[in-house]
Structures are given as C-alpha cells and as structure tokens.
Image: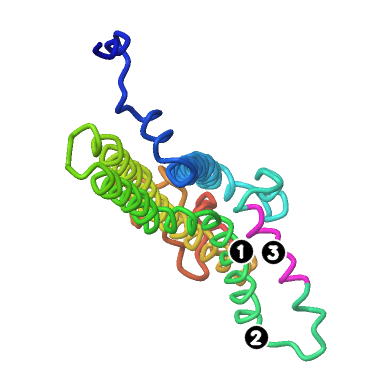
Amino acid sequence: MQAAPAAAGSNPYGLIPALQQGGIIAISVFAVLVLMSVFSFYILFTKLMQQQKIIAQGRKVRSSFWNSPNLREAAQKLETRSAYRSIVDDALLAQDQHGKLTDPIDQHDWMANSRARSQGAINSRLCEGLAFLATVGSTAPFIGLFGTVVGIYRALIKIGAAGQASIDAVAGPVGEALIMTALGLVVAVPAVLAYNWLIRRNKSIMEDLAAFTNDLHGYLMSAGAVKPRMAGAPSKGSAQTRSGAAPAQPGSEPLRTAQPTGAK
C-alpha cells in the first residue's frame, strides 16, 4: 500500500523541518544568528535615540544658551547629564583648577586639553556598541556559511548511504544549507548598514560639539566678550553676515545691542 499523502498545507522542507533534520548544529547556528540580529537592532534603536537626544540638545544650545548673562546660568538651562552640559561643566572646572596649579601652564593649553578630554569621553559613549555591529556584519555570513557546509555534508552522507542522488535524500539537507546562507546575509546586511549610518551621524554630532567647544573656549578666554552669532540675529544687509556657527572676532560683542551715538 502507498503511504498516506501529507496533510494539506504541511511543508516537509520548511524552516522548522530543516532545523529538526539538521540537529544541534543547525539549531545552534540559527540561534546564534537570531541573537546577533536581535542585539543589532537593539543597538541601532538605542543609539538612534541617544543621537537624537544630543541633536535636540544642540538645537536648544543654539536657541537659548548664549543669551544667558553668564556661563553658569546658561549651564542651568541644559539637562544635567547632557553632552553639552558635560562640556560646559568640564570647562568651568578646568578654569577653576587652572588658578590652583602650583606650576601653572598656559591657560589656553589647559583649557584645550580639558576640551579634548570632554569630547573624547562623549565620542566614546557614542561609539559604544558599534564594534558589535561591525563584528556582526563581518562574521554573520561566515556563521551562515558554516551551517551551509554542514547541510551540504549531511546531503553527501545521505547520498552515499542511499547509493543514489535522489531528490528525497538531498532536498532536506540542501534546503537547510540554503536557509543558513540566507540567514547569514539577512543578519549581516542590516548590521553593516546600521554601522555605517550611525558612524556618519556620530561624525556630524561631533562636528557640532567641536564647534560648540570652540565657541566656549573663545568665550572663556575673552571673559565673555567673544560669543557666536545667533541664528536670525543679523539682517542680510548688515555688516555682520557671517555663518551662525562662526564666533565673533576678538574684542567684538555681536550679541549686545548697539550703543547710542556718543556713548562711552
């Protein structure tokens, strides 16, 4: 008698049957790839939220920070654990510490070192987790390839045991091999794209932070006389038409209202 036909809708060559036939090796490779994918998307979303938070802080700095009468009051407008607040706090601390040095160095060098240290710490926090994305992007295809090799090996073993290359003997192992190859690529490609995208966004954020720290350095070294131009402050026909991110020349105060004619 012929075997009863398979139940309607069942697929003997699907993912679950392929994993069951592949045994512990196929299940282990599949589990590793799934974990890689889950952690990759977790890092992507958490880093995007972190980056977006810093970008929003940058907008707040450009809109209101430099309008404060002094730097300490301006710092209170920023979130306590924000990147910009960290730079301001470190700069103020370095300014206080410079006067306590028994063998002081040039204040410009001292402040520049503090600024570089703050930016380095922020950059390190922004880059946390990106190494994992790079690792996933470079290793996931090879982990999938390992599953592929095992699947092809099992197909060859079945062919040798059966004495002939029948479709029934090799369909399951070959299907398992192709699934592992596809899974490796599905995990690797988003990880590589996410890594490159986050790196580009980090670069843009660090450029904005570098511009802010330069403005802050000029403000501290000039005792508040040098401030960056605020967006929308000058008119197109005025003499002050430089970029909103460019600091004023030493000795000028672009944010202060003009003195009346004849005022001293």
Of circles 3 and 2, the one toward us is: 3
Most extreme residue toward the bottom is 103
Looking at the image, residue 5 lies above or below residue 202: above
Of circles 3 and 1, the one toward us is: 1
Q: Residue at x 59, y 62 (%)?
A: 264
Helix or strand or loop: what does disc 3 sit on? helix
Amino acid on which disc 1 is placed: Ala
Q: Position of residue 151 (x, y in %)?
A: 32, 46
Q: Nearer the viewer, residue 53 or 126?
A: 126
Looking at the image, residue 14 lies above or below residue 189: above
Which portion, as a residue range, is magenta? 85-96
Magenta segment, prevailing SS (helix, strand or loop): helix
Q: Is residue 5 rendered to the left or right of residue 32?
A: left
Query: What's the mark number on residue 121?
Result: 1
Q: Give the Cα distance between marks 3 and 1.
A: 11 Å
Helix or strand or loop: what does disc 2 sit on? loop
Residue 93 part of the magenta segment: yes
Query: What's the mark number on residue 24?
Result: none
| Location of mark 3 (residue) | 90
Looking at the image, residue 158 lies above or below residue 109: above
Residue 37 in which image quadrant:
top left
Query: What's the mark number on residue 106?
Result: 2
**Disc on the earlier residue, 3 or 1:** 3
Residue 128 in which image quadrant:
bottom right
**Disc on the earlier residue, 1 or 2:** 2
Residue 168 in which image quadrant:
top left
Mark 2 surroundings within 10 Å by alpha-carbon count, few (fewer than 14), some (14 through 19), many (20 or more): few
Q: Give the Cα distance between marks 3 and 2.
A: 17 Å
Amino acid on which disc 3 is placed: Asp
Q: Position of residue 145 (x, y in %)?
A: 32, 53
